[in-house]
Image (tube, helix red, strand yellow):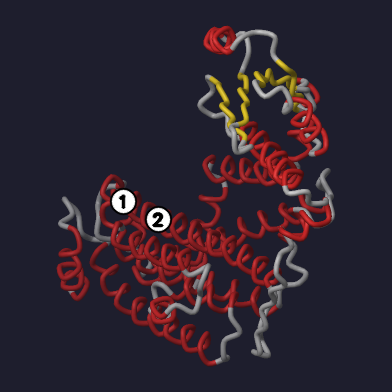
Amino acid sequence: MREFWIIFKQAFASKAKSKSFIITTALMIAVIFLLANISKIIDTVQDVTGTGDTQSVLQVVDTSGMLVDRLEAQLSAGGSNLTAEEAKESEKVLTDKVSSGDIDSFLSLSVDEQGTIHANYTTMSMMDFSMPQRIQDALQSIQTEMKAEELSLTGAEVQTLFTPIQFEQKNVSPSAKSEEELNQARFLVYVLMFVIYMAVIMYASMIAMDVANEKSSRVMEILISSVSPVKHMFAKVLGIGSLGILQIIIYGITGFIALKTSATEVPGGFSDFFSIKDVSMSTLVYAAVFFVLGYFLYATLAALLGSLVSRAEDVQQMIMPMTMLIVVAFIISATGLSNPELGYVTYASYFPFFAPLVMFLRVGMLDLPMWEPLLAIAIMLLTIFVLGWFGARVYRGGVLMYGPSRSLKDIKKAIQLGKE
């Protein structure tokens, strides 16, 4: 076991001290604090640049002669920073001013014989979406008022026309969740799924790359002369896996501190939405279990594939099938967020390479019988055991193979070489 722990410590320490690991961790910590304080940062930038509460003036050409004042009143009542002002120039002059950049936009209004408002909004900006929508909403309210006056309806009578129906959804299931609970669970599940997805891809690829680098530098020949290839494989998987768990714990603690010290503590805001106080402990436990099992499943496969290549440049091509598996698992999980009870989601949750994401999705969103996640966990454990046994046989011969890789066909050659 002494050799095992030496390789374990070497794999852990070498990656932990690498510049890429330190820089990536520092950048992620900075991003987490940035996202937690994004509202405060935006407000500060707006205060400095003066774009926060700037009052915009909209030139209005009103041929009806009765809409400008009503539009101004509607915009003011809606708390908009937009002011409507009757234009003194013609539409042609205003169009030339918009084209030359002297003004941003203008509005033309008219009323036909049926009392319907016609509006033309002229602008040069391709990204001008919010202002036209505010104007349209205000004009729609004015249109409603005009039709109500035409029909001699009071304000109370107009309001009754828009009274929404009383619709309630009742779920008789004892484990039913409210819409708010489902939204919070959906968001948390998505975040944890993304963490599992990124960790599996990043750390599994790191193992495959590390094995390939040791082979290309001929260090592998020295290592396997003093320690068995099987010990070397599992020590490397555990070492880099422990580093990954440590990094995720750092991110978790950073996120907790960032939310607690955030300068934008608004009730019902992002921090409340992301809070895990209402999430069951079993969901968090399953997140940890599926993360660990998913990592070892893909890490063992990555070590197996990494042992078949002699150059670091060939690693990405060799692990492409593994990468596609986790990508497909993430796509299935993402599509199942809106309806985790879909048939293909249920079946995919028992496939070992999809289970870390898909079964965790179902556990987080649904109240499943205990046997379902336990069955998926048992299938994953069995797969890890079989893959470890098979991977050890391939790894034993694969680390001694040099020359160009012929993709997965080299597995048979590696097994034969390992027997010798």
The foreground one among 69 and 417 is 69
Residue 111 horizontal side relative to residue 266, left or right: left
Give the residue drawn at x 39%, y 81%.
Answer: 347
Q: Which residue is mark 1?
A: 316
Crowding at mark 2 (Cα within 10 Å: few <14, some 14-19, many 20+): many
Q: In the image, what residue type sits under mark 1?
A: Gln
Would residue 212 be seen by someone viewing this image from the given angle? yes
Q: Quadrant of residue 232?
A: bottom left
Q: Position of residue 376 (x, y in %)?
A: 46, 84
Residue 205: which numbered mark, if any? 2
Location of residue 238 in the rendering, given as x and y in whole percent from the top left corner:
50, 67
Q: Is residue 3 visible?
A: no
SS for dot 2: helix
Which image quarter holds the C terminus? bottom left
Q: Nearer the viewer, residue 109 or 335?
A: 109
Q: Is residue 385 above or below residue 224?
A: below
At 22% from the left and 72% from the top, the residue drawn is 418
Horizontal arrangement in the rendering, residue 199 relative to residue 257 (left or right): left
